[in-house]
Image (tube, helix red, strand yellow):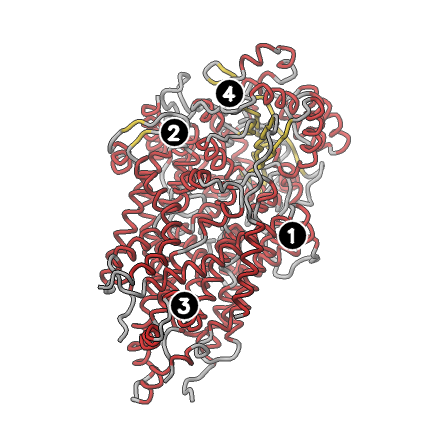
Amino acid sequence: MHRRGLLKGALSTVTALAMPQVARGQASRKLSLLTWNIADQEQLFKEEFADFQKAYPGTEIEWLDKKGTELAAFYQTQLVAGTAPDVVDLQGAIWVEYAANGALLDLTPYLQAEPEFVRLFNGDYLASWRYDGKNYMLPFYIAKTLLYYNKGMFKEAGIFGPPQSFDELLAFAQKMALAEKTGFLTLNFDWLYWPLFKMNGVDLLTPDLKKAAFNTPQAIDVLARLAAATGSGAINKISWTGRWVEPNGAFASNTVGMLHAHSSSYFFVKGQGPWINADTLGVAHAPGFWATPTNHGFGISKSSKNPDLAWAFVKHLTGNRWATEFSRRRKLLTGNIAADTDGLALLRKDDPVAAQVLQTQLEHTDKFCGNWPLPFDAQLKDAFYPEIQNAALGRKDAKSALNDAERAVNRLLSRRS
Amino acid sequence: MRIRSALPIWCFLAPSLVIFLLYRVLPLAWNLVLSFQDWSPLKAARWVGLSQYEEMLFDDEVFWQALWNTVFFIASAPIAVLLALGLALLVNADIRGRNIYRTIIFISYPLMTVAVAIIWRWMFEERVGLINYVARSLDLVTQPIPFLNSFQWALPSVIAANTWQMLGFYMIILLTGLQNIPENLYEAAAIDGASARRRFWRITVPLLKPSLFLCFVVGMLNSFTSFDLVYVMTGGGPGRATELLVTYIYKLGFVQTRFDYAAAVTVFYFALLVAITWSANRLSGGNAGAVERD
Amino acid sequence: MRRYPRWPIHMALLTVSVLMLLPFYWVVKTSVSGENIFAYPPSIIPKSPHLFYYVDAWYYIPFARYFVNSIVVSSIAVVANVILNAMAGYALTRDFVGKPFVLFLFLSCMMIPFQATIIPAYLITGRLGLLDSFWGLALPQCSTIVCIFVFKGSFDAVPRSLVDAARIDGLSEWRIIWKVMMPLAKSAIATNVILAFVWSWNNFMWPLIVTRSADMQTLPLGLARFLSYQEDTTGALYAFCVMVLAPGVLLFLLAQREFIQGLTSGATKG
């Protein structure tokens, strides 16, 4: 009986709280921004928005942030419903999919109208967002792979200096592989492991991107050696099965000789590994200076109701003032040349190792690999990578793995071209 | 019989039916229609007949691997349920501290799946994981066991983690089921001289059939309700060793933007589950396992 | 009275308890020490434990706001579940035309993976004008088939004599549910409450899709903040998970006595 009274009381309270929000009065202009896992920069964004609103009074800015694994689900649901956010931050190659499907606005006209603005950015990185002759994104922050190495473990194994070739890389890794320790670990998402193949002259696809080109004796040899090294413990298995936390966590636990990852790893690893400082952590390029870029860019949704305002907003976020601020606070590179120069200079004083790491990101930008602007990039990864896993973990031999991968990739290419 | 008295019954069913119509039946219909089309979020739809199904059945080894893994997962569900049955009977016994035992068994169920996935991933880790550490400390094995890196052990490992989390759930369903068995039946049987074993098999088991049936169904559905756990623990890897139909559906839809193909797989999966349930229902006497009362 | 020895039961339950608690111990340990779980060999005792991760978890996200949102949504879900499921469960104990079909329909509705319904569910919620609202969050969770069957099972166990007596006394069907059935189905109510709460409390994907404003987010969505790329937030992540776990466990403890056999079977005697 008193339960019923409680029930009634609860029901009315809850109903009152749940009343649908009063329809928003005519907001003159509203912009929504979707970012990819950068919720810790809330303060920075607040300031950026306030600054923008000074120049464009009456603009309401809605900020949404989603983790990478959920961003796609969220964005696509919004696409179907017709309410996609005006500005969207995308990582890696997923933008090509959306661009090819007509979800993103072609920014070329805007870029052509403002050449001085375009000049603010690093040309090599900017060019990575061209598809079908059109530009779709501006750089938000950029990174590419590099080689971190554990100087302590190197010294113990009698190795001096980072490896200069694939052979050396494997040999060094083998030397350091004792008991619980392993010699080498790589990240594997977004094609980050591709430099291992590219440095041996392996290409994924033919230049016209119509057929698989990786089933060569050279590639079979590389894969077989990677598999052997994984089996012997020289290469840590997490390279092939881990995502973000395990590979970085493993390196941070001081049991892995080399980590092949991009600049963001440095900060994560440093947080988990108190042993890391200038004397213990070495920073180098991968042999051959090959690197896979993994960048974040800002694009504008085609369905945006305020494309010009969205463009102004993107310019605001990537312009010198705020890119510099972003680079300073978050210690990364933005692709905006002035901002990066400024940020690096500051970092050299505060955290020389971080500065070293970021410096590598600006060098050898003519040696990008692992980046093919195809709208079905996700499917391509799905067709190719599991076979690499199969071979690397010893389930299949390299030859049959690459054969199967070639079949799957060609089938995909013929279907989608 | 009496049509007038059927009205309140339908009124009672209506609210639930409406919710299921909106959030289950209509979405299924959406998937069904989509499975016969070629569609992407910003393009107009085009009818393509059975070509999605053809591709799925004849041109997709990932589908078959995922199907096999799913069937394996479903087949392992009864083990967890029977384990939970044993636990439910134990904690139902008249012993001291049974409240504590019950809480301990249950506590893993409300824990966020992300935490479960990360911890179990660590426990199974080949070099630094707890299980290998214990096994090697006790000299049970010489080589570390590559649980989540191995193609044979990855899926059983994921199932083990899932079982750990589900035991609490099965337990409370079965405890409620045990509640429904009147004490006086046991007492009468005891007076008649029935042994504990007879009482168990003649009274407990038959009257637990509805709860057991429910647990088996939920166990079967675990092959997709465990999505979060599988996705975070292994992402379907290594290779396709832990790829389930549900993770494949999710990837097809939200990673590869192939909602139409994902819809075909969904429809197939639904049909498969319905077929299994229907057969199980017939085998257990119909009426969702409910027992005819006198 | 009982002629079987107790200690084997205790042995078995103790073993099970240790196995069940082991992973859980590590979650709690990491939440107070934030150690890298990949350190080898694993340490049993936490090094320099402190409670600051719990403070972090509170401050990294708008914990209070998210908490309140979760409470509202879960309250709606729990109350709706108990009422709707009891009604449907009762209906299924009666015979009526089309009963096998309805039973089958309910069973089949369970077989649809949520991941395949995300987009249509969002569109439907949009049509209903419930996007980004508490009812939009709660509606899909207001009735669950498992719990309907739990009620059905408990209602089936109520002797027909009682129900017939109530009908002869002139009680309407509605009152039969609340006056006759529910008092005898306390265990089913407890199960419903616990499950509906846990499912709506931990639900992650649906709130992610259906909410946009920052102040409508529910607690699990705060998780993203602890899975950041740049910082190591493992300690805070686990502290957050423990904090999210607490209400569910509390609820279970409160409802414990409903699972003790014998307490509710009194009415069926004589």
Find out whether the residues at labels 1 and 3 contact each other: C-beta distance under 8 Å.
Answer: no
Residue A167, x across and y down, in percent: 51, 30
Q: Chain of mark 1?
A: C
Residue C131, x across and y down, in percent: 50, 40
| Disc number lying in front (2 or 1) | 2
Q: Chain of mark 2?
A: B
Instruction: Measure the alpha-carbon separation of dots 4 and 1.
Output: 44 Å
Dots 2 and 4 on the same chain:
no
Find out whether the residues at labels 4 and 1 contact each other: C-beta distance under 8 Å.
Answer: no
Dot label at residue C175:
3
Q: Is residue A55 above or below residue B258?
A: above
Quarter occupied by the C terminus of chain A = top left
Foreground pick, A84 / B244: A84
Q: What amino acid does circle 1 point to? A: Gly
Q: Is residue C14 left or right of residue A324?
A: left
Instruction: Measure the alpha-carbon separation of dots 3 and 4.
Output: 61 Å
Q: Secondary structure at mark 2?
A: loop
* Residue A52 in view (yes/no): yes
Dot label at residue C34:
1
* Residue A201 in view (yes/no): no
Find out whether the residues at labels 2 and 3 contact each other: C-beta distance under 8 Å.
Answer: no
Residue C230, x across and y down, in percent: 63, 38
